[in-house]
Image (cartoon, grey):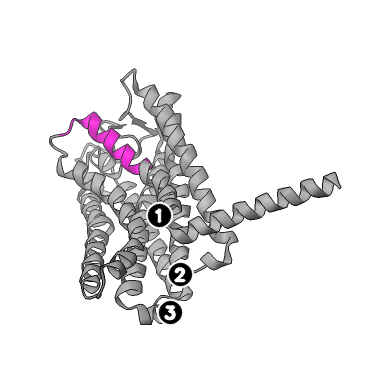
Amino acid sequence: MNLFNSALGENITFVKPAYFIISGLSGSPKMKHYYVFLFFVYVVSVLGNTAVMAVIYLDHNLRTPKYIAVFNLAFVDLFGSSALVPKILDIFLFNHQYIPYSDCLAFLFFCYTSLSMQSFNLVALSYDRLIAIVFPLHYQVKVTHRFMLSMIACFWVFVIIAVLISVGLLTRLSFCKSVVINSYFCDHGQIYRLACNDYTPSLIIGVLLVVVILCFPLTFILFTYFCISYALSKVATVQERVKAFKTCTAHLSLVAIYFIPLLITFTLMEKIHPNARIINLSLTSVFPPMLNPIIYVLQTQEIKESVKKKLKIRRKSKVTIKRSIIM
């Protein structure tokens, strides 16, 4: 406490606010249309990700290491959407912009955990594609159920610990100035910049999180596709190359949807109006969970075949029931 008092000044004491005010998407009369759109996105996200999880769980043929990662991605998307969108609607649509201090930190924890796990889940899927295409004869040995479950579990543990550290450092800050957060949720960077004592540890952990959660995964994914492209260049026929690359299209689409908007927003941060930046970041948070299940259902042959089988079985059962009733 003495260290914090010295950082604040001799006559200033440590201040923990009762609440924060989320103000990022307020002030525009047309924003209600955006909230309706967010609600639609949330409904599609819940239905789509629940459907993907159900198909993978019910179809024993899809219980492979690859689809363990796809199941986890659908769970993370469902978890993240449910943590973020209902709270955004509650804050801005129903004017509950005053959020208690502890609730704000919990909101931050769940949002950052889900966003971070989306990134690491793309790493797991890229590793799966790397081994399947570059080392196909070793795939059954290198990518096992146990290995995929262990990798995903390690990602969860790492993300939870990293986000908990960042939240813990925020609790050691004093807020004797403004409590207004200019964002659409309890944003880590926006919160520590409101502190009136030294927030260097929070700044450092924020930079490290960006590097570890965004830069390292993206670098690894780009490296895997460089290796995949090199391996495919050695394949004799064009048809074999196209067939192998088609297995990567769903994953590449997910990578593009997740990383490209973030890169554009952060690259043009100074040139974008603050309100436009907030809307861009909010769309970046809610769009991938909605599009991921759609992409996997449309672009993954195994899931499409599984869905068709389930629908055929359901139709046959209805026909059988009707016949039994008639007879």
Residue 20, position in %: x, y? Answer: 36, 33
Residue 171, position in %: x, y? Answer: 34, 47
Residue 182: which quarter of the image? top left
Tell which residue pokes out farthest to the right in this image: 327
Q: Is residue 284 magenta?
A: yes
Give the residue type that dot 1 points to: Gln
Q: What residue do we see at 58% from left, 66% from top?
A: 60
Q: Secondary structure at mark 1?
A: helix
- Return the residue nearer the eye: 133 or 316: 316
Magenta segment: 272-286
- Return the residue nearer the eye: 292 or 83: 292
Give the residue type that dot 2 points to: Pro
Give the residue type that dot 3 points to: Gln
Q: Disc 2 versus disc 3: distance between alpha carbons?
A: 10 Å
Q: In the rendered image, which residue does mark 2 sit on?
A: 65
Mark 2 and mark 1 lie on one chain; the one further toward the N terminus is 2
Q: In the rendered image, which residue does mark 1 sit on?
A: 299
Mark 2 and mark 3 lie on one chain; the one further toward the N terminus is 2
Q: Disc 3 versus disc 1: distance between alpha carbons?
A: 23 Å
Q: Secondary structure at mark 3?
A: helix
- Tag of residue 87: none
Residue 153: which quarter of the image? bottom left
Left or right? Give the position of 78 relative to 190: right
Q: In the rendered image, which residue does mark 3 sit on?
A: 140
Q: What residue do we see at 26% from left, 39% from top?
A: 190
Tell me the mark number nearer the camera, choosing from 2 and 1: 1
